[in-house]
């Protein structure tokens, strides 16, 4: 909300804040979508929930792409390699990031066309009895399993690559400092460590999210069981914990959060 108000005032937004805005918007829409799904299940609403599941997959993938490109952004800005391609990317990353995010989501949507056709084709082959709402939900998940797992692993690999590049850059930098006989606790080293810590935590949360996603997909037929409920709760840890990490590591977001907490305490 803060970045949106600043964008309305200045008519421009830095790429990092643009990714943070898209990330917060996608996660908010994901939470609203989940609330709508559970509301329909709680009151046994007879309408089809397919569109809500489609939206959940889309918003979740948008959140993952924003997280991945945010990691790439921090990586490119911090690493210190004498490479012409990296130097070119550093100079143009601010302009490329919104386009890269748009291209990523476009590729995902185009790749999902086959799953959509597969989902709508299966009910047409049912000539004996019509599918129930639960059967439709299971059919939708089965149709989207390949594309969902594929793009989730791609995003996870991008985060791993960004973290490894930062680790290699830090190792080379520390080795050069030691070779010159200078202290390794310089500003560049501190910046590397400041960026790497949240990225390592993000990787662990991401791994937990992937494991929970696989468990939930494989047990979707047992949607109302305790196992499914526990995996859904575990999956929600990733966006919640990652948002807290971003707020804590971003000075502007941390300042806004502290200001809001002070207002609530006074109220």
Image (cartoon, rainbow, N blue to C red):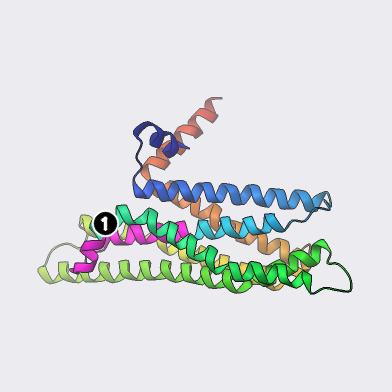
Helix, strand or loop: magenta stretch: helix
User: Magenta includes 75?
Assistant: yes
Viewer-side residue, 242 vs 220: 220
The residue located at (34%, 40%) in the rendering is 12
254, above or below 114, in the image: above
- 77 drawn magenta: yes
Left or right of residue 267, residue 45 in this image: right
The x and y percentages for residue 126 are: 82, 73
Between 115 and 46, the one lying in front of the other is 115
Report the residue that reaches farthest toward the left: 180
- What residue appears at the point 58 percent right and 67 percent down from the top-left corner? 112
Judge whether 106 appears above or below 165 on screen: above
Residue 238 at least partly seen = yes
The magenta stretch spans which residues? 65-89
Under tag 1, what secondary structure?
helix
Q: Which residue is mark 1?
A: 92
Left or right of residue 95, residue 150 in this image? right
User: From where the camera sits, is residue 174 visible?
Assistant: no
| Percent coordinates x, y for residue 116 in the rendering | 64, 66
The image position of residue 215, as x and y in percent, is 66, 71
Counting other residues with Cα less than 10 Å from the Cα at mark 1, is it few (<14), some (14-19), or many (20 or more)? few
Q: Quadrant of residue 101?
A: bottom left
Q: Is residue 138 left or right of residue 175?
A: right
Q: Is residue 178 above or below residue 32?
A: below
Q: Please give the name of the residue rendered at 45% of the width and 32% of the height, measured from the top-left corner.
A: 259
Image-based side of 16 in relation to 58, left or right: left
Quarter of the figure with the C terminus: top right
């Amino acid at each position: 909300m803060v970045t949106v108000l600043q964008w309305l005032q200045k008519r421009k937004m830095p790429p990092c804040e643009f990714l943070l805005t898209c990330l917060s918007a996608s996660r908010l829409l994901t939470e609203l979508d989940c609330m709508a799904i559970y509301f329909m299940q709680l009151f046994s609403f007879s309408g089809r929930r397919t569109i809500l599941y489609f939206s959940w997959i889309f918003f979740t993938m948008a959140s993952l792409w924003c997280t991945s490109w945010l990691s790439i952004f921090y990586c490119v800005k911090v690493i210190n390699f004498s490479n012409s391609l990296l130097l070119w990317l550093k100079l143009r990353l601010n302009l490329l990031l919104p386009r890269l995010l748009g291209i990523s989501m476009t590729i995902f949507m185009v790749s999902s066309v086959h799953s959509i056709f597969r989902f709508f084709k299966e009910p047409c082959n049912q000539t004996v009895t019509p599918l129930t709402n639960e059967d439709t939900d299971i059919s939708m998940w089965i149709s989207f399993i390949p594309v969902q797992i594929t793009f989730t692993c791609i995003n996870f690999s991008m985060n791993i690559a960004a973290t490894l590049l930062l680790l290699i850059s830090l190792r080379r930098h520390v080795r050069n400092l030691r070779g010159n006989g200078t202290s390794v606790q310089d500003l560049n080293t501190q910046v590397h460590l400041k960026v790497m810590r949240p990225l390592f935590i993000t990787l662990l949360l991401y791994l937990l999210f992937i494991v929970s996603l696989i468990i939930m997909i494989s047990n979707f037929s047992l949607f109302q069981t305790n196992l499914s409920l526990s995996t859904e709760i575990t999956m929600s840890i990733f966006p919640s914990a990652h948002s807290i990490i971003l707020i804590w590591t971003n000075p502007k977001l941390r300042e806004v959060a502290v200001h809001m907490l002070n207002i609530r305490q006074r109220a």
